[in-house]
Amino acid sequence: MRVPSIRRSGLVTEKARLRALREYGNFALAYSATFQPGLDYFGGEEGFLAYKQVGGTAFVLSDPLAPISSCEDLIRNFASEKSDVCFWHASRPVAKILERIGFRVNEMGTETRIELGGYDFDGPRKRNFRRALNRAACCSYTIAERSVTSLDREELQTVSERWRQTRGVKNREMTFLTRPAVLDDEVDVRKFFTFDHKGSLQAFAFFDPIYTGGEVVGYLCSAKRRLPEADTLVGYAILHRAIRTFQDEGRVILSLGLSPLCGIEDKELSSNRLVSFGFRTVYRSRLFNKLIYPLQGFAAHKGAFGGSAEQTYCAFKKGRALSQLVKMPRACNLTRSVWEHLKEGGK
């Protein structure tokens, strides 16, 4: 199947994107690729891929939302239109397509997925769930799924902003690989909230849908935030409630998202050796983990949920990896924030 020539985002309509999402959005970042602000789109009625233009480089986000049988044509056509292009958070089937058409393909970190059927909260690895429920009861917390329109928007914004002030990136939302939290109701997105005994909002978690054949089969935990003074395990309590809800509905999968640079071996596909060495060095770096981002702690946290780890991939054309990697912080809206964080000594 031939793919139409390039179309800008205004011509790949939201209606067409939503239709493709529900039919082919069987991966964690499908919803983000469809609706994240700042993305452009290539394709048409049959399917599309999402990308972010940073200078002369097109950063493609995750897999195309199209039948796997048409992904190679879609990618080839896009690469011919945008010669300076790289791919991020691709699945293994798409990574193999990229390798076949001449890209260097590197592992970029594992995605943790929980199979909801039969998942329970027993055993020592999941003790934080049980502790969280006990502490939520002691704090007289109430956890409920609610519409955003039923809440105080100013209170919701306060929780979000105060949480962000505890992060390394304080002054802006991360983008591209992370979908910024939308403090409004959204199509098929599930939103759970925690309130104290006075009814004041303490924390929230949002879940983006994952589809198969037009049906929601699972979710990605795309945002989880709390007040600094809220119980530190409240996120586990919200996740417990969400998992139980999704299990009762017969959902199949819950993705906890990416652990960047975790588990990289690069033994199977044709990788860029310098990129592979750099990724592994950064992951092991005590300085990077302390001052910039706790990669190892993040991976250990997600590993404690007892799910499966699936590797994700990035891909570069020969000779372009370095120039594209340098632009990656801009794609993620991090450039100034990282510099300011370093000047503050990683506080």
Image: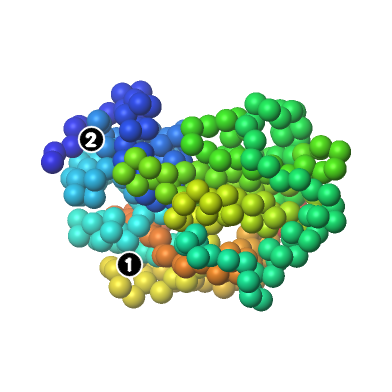
Query: Where is mark 2, residue-wise?
Result: 46
Q: In which quarter of the image is the C terminus?
A: bottom right
- Rendered location of residue 77, percent (x, y): 20, 41
Inspect this view and state whether residue 164 appears. Answer: no
Horizontal side of 113 relative to 150 (left or right) equals: left
Instruction: Name which residue lies at 83% across and 49% down.
Output: 140
- Position of residue 61 relative to residue 36, above or below, is below
Q: Nearer the viewer, residue 52 or 180?
A: 180
Foreground pick, 18 / 32: 18
Horizontal relation, residue 140 to residue 31: left or right? right
Label 1: which secondary element: loop
Is residue 215 visible in the rendered structure shown here? Answer: yes
Seen in the picture, residue 157 relative to 139 is either above or below; the reply is above
Q: Quadrant of residue 313?
A: bottom left
Tag 1: Cα neighbours inside 10 Å, few (<14), some, or many (≥20)? some
The kind of residue on which mark 2 rests is Glu
Q: Which of marks 1 and 2 is nearer the N terminus?
A: 2
Q: Which mark is residue 271?
A: 1
Amino acid type, callout 1:
Ser
